[in-house]
Amino acid sequence: MRTMIYSLALIASLSVSLTSCSDDKTMIEEKDWNTTTYFKSTDEMGQATFYKPTVGFVGDPMPFFDPKTKNFKVMYLQDFRPNQAGTYHPIWAVEASDGANYQSLGELIHCGGIDEQDAALGTGSTVYNDADGLYYTFYTGHRYQTNSTNNGEMVMMATSSDFRTWTKNRVFRLKGDDYGYSKNDFRDPFVFKGDDNKWHMLVSTLKGSKGHLAEFTSDDLKTWTHAGTFMTMMWDRFYECPDVFKMGDWWYLVYSEKHSAIRRVQYFKGKTLNELKACTQNDAGLWPDGHEGFLDSRGFYAGKTASDGQNRYIWGWCPTRPGKDNAAVGAAPNEPEWAGNLVVHRLIQHADGSLTLGEVKGISDKYGKKQEVKVMAKSDNGVENVTDGYKLSGDSYLLFNRLGYHNKISFTITTSNNWDKFGVSFVRGTDSEKYYSMIVNPENDQTRKVNFEEEGTTGHGFIAGIDGYNFARPSDNIYHVTIYTDNSIAVMYINDVCCYTNRIYGIQKNCWSINNYGGNVTITDLTVSQY
């Protein structure tokens, strides 16, 4: 890449014209906006919107709406990197009222000793019991070393009267082999109340080589009765982090597919619990069919939900990437790392019961500082100014001024036909040898697919191992696009039918672009806001 070095005198002469590309803290180091090599952007230590603790990262979340304090509590597995050998992933928590501003509650449930069943902790769920005024958290205990006489995983329990101080139940143990399930794969307990007013618990497990969601019921949360298999898992899939809830007239099972070729959050739906359970009978499900769908991309995992009675939200984690390599997205050996940032979306239910993900109002409201949007460069051909925006034709682009650490980018794209293709690129300058794009591709006449690609002279295009997200083409060919960035997290929403979470290192203090790929698109209502 060409590197441009300017004298201090030249920097001073350019400072007025480059104000829109920099904030006060970085003005002294401002260089020519053409290149992306001048700012070695790194994420802030603590991130408050797409939350990351100051030390460590967020693993599997366990969201819960607290009926006493009327706010959300989100327990999660704390990932320190390096983790302590044998005893790792204690349960920490944050709380929030709006999904946008989190307060840490610190460590709530500690790991056991190296020789105890819960030397390492795994995910679970929390409920509040009106009968005794206690919070119950059911979680997974992972034994450090196993032999023929003990279990690799069990369901365990802790209680609290105030959600701050938790007491482990030293007697309660739920073991898979007592009911014909695996001794070592028996985890991720999820507890909910059914229409029968009983407590139900689902556990992800195996029976032989076949994946099962085991079901248990209880009247008091203390004594549990095996109720058989809630659902078998199709083919060789394994449904981690199950979550069952009723929304409107539909019952849903949200889960995370463990298989490395998929590794996404998905769901089943049914008008009744029995219809929901029948979705995978005899491996007859079509993938996806009318009872199954995807939520988000591989940049969002271990999603679980909670509702305040008005809206239901889903929290998951966006993985970090080894070596901060934007291309390490899922193809071996460049798989993402376990854990990362806490990301939340709002669930949107459609008339046919299908689910999509949308913006969280608290996050949107947070980005209240409107920024100047300035065209810094454009393609030699194919760019035309129109009323309230721009028209792009052929292979063309508009390059805009640098972004900050926290950005909300909104614009509307109108395509001229059903097959036009557009995208948004980050970490881009006029001399960038590679940059990273989220591209809306036509799959067919009625379906669009978001892909993540590495573009530029040294970019290798579509990144192997990444998945896209398919959504219905808007009938009027109008795409309302909103992108939130928080350090390296980038979440794109389109028309309340598409959500695509991604991680792109280097967004901060670099330019970005809107691109057209061969057709004709019109860009209007372009705004950038920060906080």
Image (cartoon, rainbow, N blue to C red):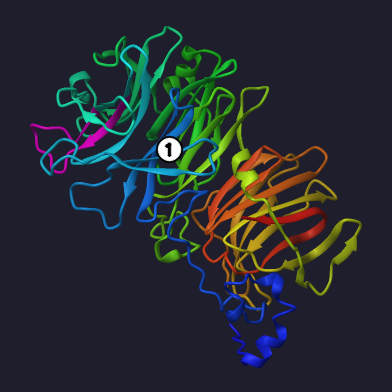
User: What are the residue bounds of the magenta stretch?
Assistant: 136-156
**Pointer 1 residue:** 257
Q: Residue furthest right?
A: 387
Residue closest to the eye, 215 or 483: 483
**Local SS, label 1:** strand
Residue closest to the eye, 232 or 477: 477
| Position of residue 29 in the picture relative to residue 370 (left or right) | left
Q: Position of residue 19 (x, y in %)?
A: 70, 73
Counting other residues with Cα less than 10 Å from the Cα at mark 1, is it few (<14), some (14-19), or many (20 or more)?
many
Residue 139 colored magenta? yes
In which image quadrant can residue 472 be found?
A: top right
Q: Position of residue 7 (x, y in %)?
A: 62, 93
In which image quadrant can residue 145 be found?
A: top left
| Position of residue 165 in the picture relative to residue 447 (left or right) | left
* 337 shown above or below 68: below
Q: Residue at x 67, y 78 (%)?
A: 34
Residue 21 colored magenta? no
Q: Position of residue 126 (x, y in %)?
A: 36, 27
Quadrant of the rendering where the C terminus is positioned? bottom right
| Position of residue 400 in the picture relative to residue 136 (left or right) | right
In which image quadrant can residue 456 be found?
A: bottom right
Q: Residue at x 31, y 28 (%)?
A: 137
Q: Amino acid at mark 1?
A: Glu
Quadrant of the rendering where the N terminus is positioned? bottom right
Q: Position of residue 122 (x, y in %)?
A: 29, 38
